[in-house]
Image: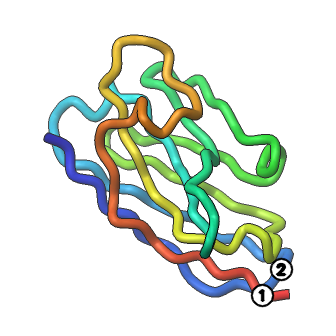
């Protein structure tokens, strides 16, 4: 079992930056693909970014060039650096982990562990 705890959310003005963190339990963190998803009110949960165990990254087009996902395996933590924030980035952001043995990208069902979410609000 893996437990994920997100932090770092908050209220920012458009154009600002936030850094989300996700701390994971367990001794096999380095073997997991880690992802970030978000869900805005009244909308479906959508993929934001993912980083493989080997450090390969993949982003949704809507955040490419503005958001950066990274991981620190020594600290069992994955980060999401969010720059040039826009009001449409407002959502609850969820950290997710996948123990699948195939390549995992943007499909939520490929992730088998989820955090409780952290709210990000961007004002215009």
Vertical placement of 85 versus 24: above or below? below
Identify the residue shown where x is 33% and y is 51%. Answer: 114
Q: Which residue is mark 1?
A: 123
Q: Can you say which quadrant of the picture contains the C terminus?
A: bottom right
State the CA–CA distance, disc 1 to disc 2: 6 Å
Residue at 81% x, 50% y: name it: 62
Tags 1 and 2 touching, CB below 8 Å: yes
Q: What residue is shown at x 52% (from left), y 77% (from top)? A: 119
Q: Dividing the picture into quarters, in which one does residue 97 lie?
A: top left
- Give the residue at x 63% y 87%: 11
Work out whether residue 97 or residue 23 is closer to the camera in this orientation and state it: 97
Q: Secondary structure at mark 1?
A: strand
How is the model colour-coded? rainbow
Q: Residue 108: where, in percent of width, then height?
A: 48, 39
Left or right, 37 with reference to 31: right
- Decide: is 120 above or below 52: below
| Residue 56 placement: quadrant | top right
Marker disc for residue 14? 2
Tag 1: Cα neighbours inside 10 Å, few (<14), some, or many (≥20)? some
């Amino acid at each position: 079992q893996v437990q994920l705890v997100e932090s770092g959310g908050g209220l920012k003005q458009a154009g600002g930056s936030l850094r989300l963190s996700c701390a994971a339990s367990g001794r096999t963190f380095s073997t997991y693909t880690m992802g970030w998803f978000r869900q805005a009110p009244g909308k479906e949960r959508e993929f934001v970014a993912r980083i493989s165990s080997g450090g390969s990254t993949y982003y949704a087009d809507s955040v490419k060039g503005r958001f950066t996902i990274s991981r620190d395996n020594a600290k069992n933590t994955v980060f999401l650096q969010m720059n040039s924030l826009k009001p449409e980035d407002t959502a609850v952001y969820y950290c997710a982990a996948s123990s699948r043995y195939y390549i995992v990208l943007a499909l939520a069902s490929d992730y088998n562990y989820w955090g409780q979410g952290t709210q990000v609000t961007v004002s215009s």
